[in-house]
Image (cartoon, rainbow, N blue to C red):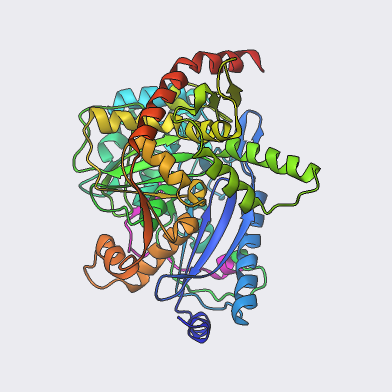
Amino acid sequence: MNLEAVKQEIVSGKTSLGIEFGSTRIKAVLIGSDHSPIASGSHDWENRLENHIWTYSLEDIWGGLQDCYSNLVKDVADRYGVTIRKIGSIGFSAMMHGYMAFNEAGELLVPFRTWRNTMTEEASNRLTEVFRYHIPQRWSIAHLYQAVLNKEPHVPQVAHFTTLAGYVHWKMTGRKVLGVGEASGMFPIDLATKQFNTRMIGQFNELIADNQFPWTLEQILPEVLSAGEDAGVLTEEGAKLLDVSGNLEAGIPLCPPEGDAGTGMTATNSVAVRTGNVSAGTSVFAMVVLEHELSRVYDAIDLVTTPTGNLVGMVHCNNCTSDLNAWVSLFAECLDSFGCKPDMNEVYGTLYRKALEGDADCGGLLAYNYFSGEHITGFEEGRPMFVRKPDSKLNLANFMRVNLFTALGALKTGLDIMIKEENVKIDRMLGHGGLYKTKSVGQKITAAAMNAPVSVMETAGEGGAWGIALLAAYMLNREKGETLEAYLDNKVFAGMSGTSEEPNPKDVAGFDEFMKVYKSGLAIERAAVESLQ
């Protein structure tokens, strides 16, 4: 669309807005009727470790959201000379899982416990045993049950618990709902009904019956909705909470709030069976839409759903690019000390590309990117570290390569189970997130880790915020009976270009060699955790 056409769509409200709360950034993307991004805004934020719990405060959430939206409004004003007053539809998404519990008055009972916390092992193991269904430590139900086991005083007061996406949506609309994909990271979903599994709800209620709480689980869970369903409208209070200038009008329809897994699937057109995607940022996860259920329960593989309720095998790791980013920042600081002022995008691009010059197996270098615990490899805490032997080949190329490899090390540990042991078939794998911003590099590394082709679309950098904007547009514009898969294929991604990287056999073999060192060196990481308190 030309500038005037975009301007008219903004003024008339023929747009859709997606806002996603990522781990390090809140991002807003406004799209036009052709689904292309026309403006954006963002706000950087960081979780903090308080009383051994990774959290964000309510002030972080609302101040960050308002600043993000204000930056979007400024971008629209700068580009098109107009003020946002109407929007066709809105969607909110956030990093999945975690625990936000509220009392009858709507007050937060304990600080928000994010997905990053690995303190629910007892609950996770017990629920997995009872349900015969893998319940990861970061799932909301594991946090709730661990609080029960710990006899935390807030538990009897719980009237409602939800995720970050569900919380923001509730405050915007007054409705306590979740999209089915996000809901599948709270509690298991019945694939036949696309609702929470009632058998398991009953089992949970029996498990906690002796406590005689004034609630049962079904009473405090949010309502589950599938993509395209009505999830309420922006209230007057919600409009003021989002737009502090007061220009945004109430009454805008909202789509069901989703998690970053569901928005990642949508943003990469990976909601159909035998498609998959990898989201690589602060955390990393890979998802494949399955043809059938897995043969048994695997601790390393989570079962979630697409935004339409289809079964997804998911490997999720807590750590990905945080340590990599720290090293890049160190190199930038070094350059600054010599009087150089390079653009950070140039620093990232140059260093990432340098990694492609390294030895296939990283020259014997070893690194662990564990800022926090990593359940797949059995760590409740992490210590970032770099290790080498005297005869290892230390140079810049190998150093950058090993830090890119280790960003996917834990992920590969889990993916090998799904692909090699369960013989899961993948027709198409797409990448998105910060790891893929430098052309080809992240793709080549991921293709080597998975031994499968990896594509990145031109919109990969927009990530989940664009994905939730697409879900908002789908709810608003879909034709009767039109599936999300058909909508994405025919109206969003038709004719869209991207790049694909096939796995290089030499790189695949090199990654496998690196993984042997990675696995044998975990004892070093364990010693670091135990020794550096």
User: Quadrant location of residue 215?
Assistant: top left
Q: What is the tally of numbered marks visible in this picture?
A: 0
Give coordinates of residue 282: x percent, y percent: 54, 41
From the viewer's perspective, tell me whether residue 195 is left or right of residue 147: left
Q: Name which residue lies at 55% across and 30% down.
A: 369
| Above-or-below relation of 311 to 247 | above
Depth check: give the residue in front, 218 or 513: 513
Depth check: give the residue in front, 33 or 69: 33
User: Residue 487, can we see it?
Assistant: yes
| Above-or-below relation of 347 to 137 | below
Quadrant position of the N terminus in the picture: bottom left
User: Quadrant location of residue 249?
Assistant: bottom right
Quadrant position of the C terminus in the picture: top right
| Above-or-below relation of 466 to 531 | below
Give coordinates of residue 34: x percent, y percent: 39, 74
User: Residue 185, can we see it?
Assistant: no
From the viewer's perspective, tell me whether residue 57 is left or right of residue 375: right
Depth check: give the residue in front, 341 or 223: 341
Residue 178 sits inside the magenta stretch:
no
The segment highlighted magenta reads 221-240
Give coordinates of residue 136: x percent, y percent: 40, 31
Give coordinates of residue 358: x percent, y percent: 51, 34
Looking at the magenta stretch, what is its main secondary structure? loop
From the viewer's perspective, tell me whether residue 24 is left or right of residue 411: right
Residue 224 sits inside the magenta stretch:
yes
Depth check: give the residue in front, 384 or 256: 384
Q: Name which residue lies at 59% across and 51% down.
A: 25
